[in-house]
Image (cartoon, rainbow, N blue to C red):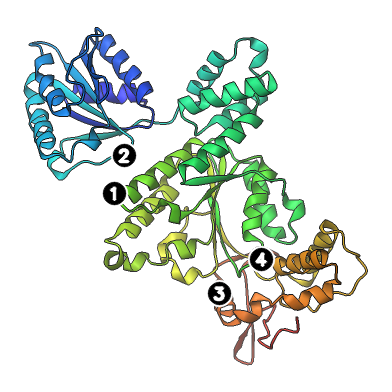
Amino acid sequence: MNLTERLGELISACFTGIWIESHEHQDAIVEIAQLCRDEGWSFANWDIEQGMTLSGGETSSEAGDPLAAVRSLKALASDDGTAVLVMNNLHRFIGSTEVMQAVQRQLVAGKQNRTILIVLSPVVSIPAELELFVVVEHEMPSRDQLLEIARGIATEETELPTGSELDLVLDAAGGLTRAEAESAFSLSLVRHGRIQPDAIWELKSQMLKKSGLLEMYRGDADFGSLGGLSALKSFYRRALSRSSENVKPRGVMLPSPPGCGKSQFCKALGRETGRPVIILDVGSLMGSLVGQTEQRTRQALRIIDAMAPAIVMLDEIDKAFAGVGGSGQSDSGVSARMFGSFLSWLNDRESDTFVVCTANDVGKLPPEFARAERFDSIFFVDLPSREEKNLIWEQYISVYGLAADQTKPKDDVWTGAEIKAACRLAALLDIPIKAAAQNVVPVAVTSSESIERLRAWARGRCIDAHNGGLYELEFKKGKTKSRRKIKVDPSLN
């Protein structure tokens, strides 16, 4: 149901206060004005610069007075009709006691004379005294609306692609506002002479970064550049390729020691499946004002849904939600409410968004986070095996142009990130790999106890990302032993 249909129902039912959360005021005003013309309702619009503008084009001289604008709504009422007043950014003035009181009286009186007050605002900031307001979200443009915008920008039929290429353009434009989509299509016409997805992705990445809520990753890394993780790659290459309208993959939880490739898997998955990778930093959602965190969370999730199909990456989720249990004492419950919103979205979303959450210490997460239907599965990414290490050495020796026949350091407990670091330092310092390795201290040595705890937790709870099947630990003489036991002796490197 679009904005016009929702407003038509609410106004017909005489909801006297409607708060529209929108970042596209002009488009919302056009839709509301058209609805009023179709229904024969009186319409007026107010903002602090131009004052009151009636449907006939007349303006009021009381430009900067929101109090007078609210009081004037009763003058628009008629005996047998409905009057609608749209006020832009009233949240900036509603903190005034006089304005708040006038709005409260108007919401009550509107039931008698069918006068409707609509507030357009990018945030929802409603005082407790004005609980009669109902909140409506102005949704991002749909694919049909984006197609209509593209047709309006393209001056010739050859400038607008067709078929699968048109689908790529609309996928790229998903999540943009109407104004942003117009700018992206225009940029593509100027740069390429026709509407293509490349220019749209570039502008879209800039728009997301500007919002401060999300970032977009579009790199060249694919599964061929990521050694190991055979079972994990196979599972989700197949799952995402078979995604349909009725059956969609949900996502994956990846607990792992640091540096084992879980973040790189997410980035490579986007390239492998042709989907953008959206990086959501939970810390960026936190706001200093009351209600700001919740509003920013809703906005970020709404943008993500509009950008589907997409890969959503939440890196080190254990650090982001580690304090949820004590949120009531530490931050008045803000973290708990944000966590609850995210859990609800994980479970109830209908958009084709695939969520990848990585964690180094899953013990800090509430147990309900990883329950069934929030993720397809939980894969444990352990330290790479001998065969996988050989592949990783070969890969990074080639990337950094090193001699392939040189002696390698002892790497029994090394991660892929540490192998890459040794190769990079060897190229940077122009020294043998074994000498460069003396500057690398494996995380499996510095954090051996925490990694063993993580392995013990993963036993029987997770799928083995390398070999498939349940991740298991071996037991010997009453002691727990990993398939790749970490030695806590000082590193030789």
* Residue 308 appearing in the image: no
In the structure shown, which secondary structural element does the residue marked by tag 4 occupy? loop
- Give neighbour class at mark 2: few <14, some 14-19, many 20+ (Cα, 10 Å): some
Q: Label 1 to label 3, Cα distance in Å?
A: 36 Å
- Give neighbour class at mark 1: few <14, some 14-19, many 20+ (Cα, 10 Å): some
In the structure shown, which secondary structural element does the residue marked by tag 1 occupy? loop
Residue 123 tag number: 2
- Give neighbour class at mark 4: few <14, some 14-19, many 20+ (Cα, 10 Å): many
Q: Position of residue 45 (x, y in %)?
A: 24, 19
Residue 454 tag number: 3
Disc on the earlier residue, 3 or 2 = 2
Residue lying at the far top of the rendered structure = 56
Disc 1 marks which residue?
Answer: 291
Q: Position of residue 108 (x, y in %)?
A: 8, 30
Q: Residue at x 31, y 39 (%)?
A: 123
Q: Is residue 384 above or below residue 292?
A: below
Q: Determine whether, in the image, residue 18 is placed left or right of residue 169.
A: left
Q: Is residue 107 above or below residue 254?
A: above
Q: Is residue 297 above or below residue 411?
A: above
